[in-house]
Image (cartoon, rainbow, N blue to C red):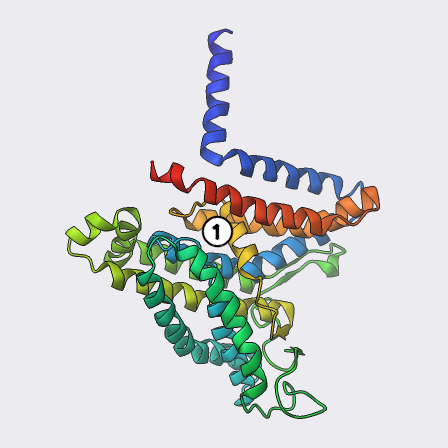
Amino acid sequence: MDKSERLQQTRLNQLVNTYGLPRLIITGFLIFLFIMAPVAGADFPTQITNVLNRFGWNAVLVLAMVPMVHSGCGLNFGIPLGILAGLLGATLSIQFGFTGALSFVMAIVISTPFAVLFGGGYGALLNKIKGGEMMVATYVGFSSVSFMCIMWLMIPYTHPSIVMAYTGVGLRNMFSLDNFYANVLSDFLKIDLNPIGVNLVIPTGSLLFIALLCFLMWAFLHTKTGTAMTAVGSNPTFAKASGINVDRIRMLSVILSTWLGAVGILVYQQGFGFVQLYMAPFNMAIPAVAAILIGGASVNKASIGNVVIGTILFQGLVTMTPTVINSLIHIDISEVIRVIVSNGMVVYALTRKTEGGK
């Protein structure tokens, strides 16, 4: 092997080590799907639109993972707590009669105290079981969703758009946001190329909102408090010796993550156009966790780049697979692939925990 070949192999190894072999495989598969889309008879601009839309719906939920990872609390499998806070904000905003863009703003405002309350209790719990956060978080998320199934029937809502039509008591399982904040971000400054014959729509407002939250998160992580949060996650013993209140910083990260989860579900709803209650939030943690892991994060390290790359890869895979694979082989295996990718990346990240500690 001559010098140029060795240099080329070294660069390839560096690329694999930097970008990660799982991400390279998934990126290659996604590129393959995009190439095969026209062959399968799918309209390419339409597929780009679908990927951008799903990125806009889900990116904030993935961003919610970052604070807890930075503080050493691990991946936030308890994100359903934040989602429930967002659902309370959404339903109460409608109950109080707000419409249009104002209903979206008020949903965020109303959900904030719930997110702080839920996040504070959640953070206090995680501070008592250091080292087992992710396992406890999973059951916190599951149990809270089940508990709210009862509360959605008991809270005395009266707005005709959201209560059950046949009894007037309890909320519907799903209701439309057409008269409220449906597409309030997606339609803001959107670029629609359909008039010129190209089926491409860019949800500019959603992308700008996500960019704003990502910038604010990046800026926060570079403040004194954000640096302390990173220090707590990297070495809590050293952080405590430096005068940092470890438990307070960890609780702050949990509250911030819970609030981002509340905002994230509201952003998801405005793009999806519906509010889903009861058991709908039960498994919403898995796609968010899988996306940030696909982006290159681990249980103790995450960045804004991991959020963006992971959401694009994961949602691109979920969007393109059913269209392309089903058209080519005429067998619906999209759900199988999605489950394999989601759970496989979670397992992959958890096996890297010891490695990261070294």
26 versus 123 height, above or below? above
Q: Position of residue 9 (x, y in %)?
A: 50, 18
Q: Is residue 245 visible?
A: yes
Q: Amino acid at mark 1?
A: Val
Q: How many marks?
A: 1
303 versus 175 height, above or below? above
Residue drawn at 61 percent across, 55 percent down: 52
Q: Residues within 10 Å of mark 1 (few under 14, many from 20)?
A: many
Residue 357, image quadrant: top left
Q: Is residue 83 visible?
A: no
Residue 166, image quadrant: bottom right
Residue drawn at 50 percent across, 30 percent down: 16
Residue drawn at 52 percent across, 76 percent down: 147
User: Relative to 223, is 337 on the left or the right?
Assistant: right
Q: Position of residue 23 (x, y in %)?
A: 54, 39
Residue of label 1: 307
Q: Position of residue 294 (x, y in %)?
A: 53, 45
In front: 193, or 267? Answer: 267
**Furthest residue toward top:** 2
Q: Position of residue 275 (x, y in %)?
A: 61, 75
In front: 308, or 128? Answer: 128
